[in-house]
Image (cartoon, helix red, strand yellow):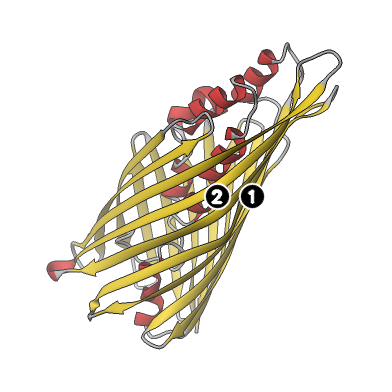
Amino acid sequence: MKNCIVRILLLTGLCCCVLQAHAQGLGSDLPTLSNLAFGWSSASGGNPAVDAMSVYAPNMLCVTQAGYRAAGEGFFCRLDFGDMRVTTNQNTALAAVGAGAVRLAHFRYASNKAHDLPFVNAVSQALGGVDASATLDGETLELSYAQPIGSPSTILGVSYVPIDSSNSKLIAPETGSISDGRYRGTGGGRVGVLQTLPHGWRIGANYSYLAGSATATFLAPTNPPSYMTQTDQYLTRKLDLGLAQQTTPRLQCYAAYSKTVASGGTLAAYHGEITAFGIRYQISPALMTQITASETNHVMGLFWKTRYGQFSILYAHRPIPNGEDYLGKGKGLAGVIDIAF
């Protein structure tokens, strides 16, 4: 099961940086910011204290601790901002290995060609009124392992990211590509721990590190037009903390804090923070609901559990209120299918 809230809220605060990157020359910041918003650090996000198969490595042991030896998950999400539609999908496979479990996750995202967005209009004006549109896409591959350390109540997990890439393109009918950006991760990983405490309490923590390089080839506004290339190195570090308590047999309350620090290019040092609170309520043995809130956003989910898996649907209202001046008001809808054997 995927907790969608952190993934779709990571764009909050990024939009100002996107506009700044465009205004300063459509450089390599754009594919990097696209990666921050939709790539690995957000795709694998969630609450490190809440069970989920496809988020942080320690949390995936909920599958084997429930008695299953193998599992798979298919995740699909659509985010809408004005005329930009971003679709994401993730396929995950998990298998028990000794006392622990190994997991392989493949994630993709892609947008349509969007014209009527505030940040695209800002680029158009900066280039003298050129009609512009934008597209984004990317891909991530993650390999994870987790197992109990010392006792079943303490779980340690690690993840390695051999592939993490994002592409951005700004297009004008008159000139073709205004800016063609490519971000490629050069090394990334994560380490985390999940601790179960008395009285239904759980705490989790994860630290993520990702280094990468981005190159942008863009059209200089000269006569005749000329193309220039810019390459920069980037570093992203992320800390995630989670706290949860099984308050009653049917009710679980939780909170999560996430801080992302990214540097390189013209970003200098980008700091993004998210604090979210939520509840899970077991309506019946087969049906559960979930509500997660962060600032003025909220995500609602409904989960139907069967003997061999789970079906989930989640809806996000105004996923990035702080970025509405740049992307407009948004919404998101996600569906998840889990199968376990």
Residue 212: x and y in percent read 55, 48
Query: Residue beneath label 1, please?
Result: 138
334 lies above or below 62: above
CB of mark 2 within 8 Å of CB of mark 1?
yes
Residue at 32 percent of width and 62 percent of height:
50
Give the quarter of the figure containing the N terminus: bottom left
Residue 29, quarter of the rendered image: top right
- Please state if 112 lies on the left or on the right of 59 as rendered: right
- Residue 46 shows up from this direction: no
**Point 41% across, 77% down: residue:** 63
Q: Residue at position x 53%, y 35% from top? A: 330
For disc 2, the marked residue is 39
At a point 67% along the width and 13% down the height, the residue shown is 125
Residue flagged by tag 2: what amino acid is it?
Gly
In the visual, does 218 lie left or right of 272? Answer: right
Up-down: is 52 above or below 19? Answer: below
The percent position of residue 211, horizontal first and vertical second, equals 50, 49
Q: Quadrant of residue 337?
A: bottom right
x, y percent for residue 54: 47, 65
The secondary structure type at the circle numbered 1 is strand
Assess disc 1: are there few (<14), some (14-19) or many (≥20) residues with their C-alpha within 10 Å of its C-alpha.
many
Q: Nearer the viewer, residue 206 or 249?
A: 206
Task: Tell me if mark 2 has few (under 14), some (14-19) or many (20+) residues whose alpha carbon lies within 10 angstroms of its own.
Answer: many
| Residue 96 disc label | none
Residue 18, horizontal then vertical, whole percent: 55, 29
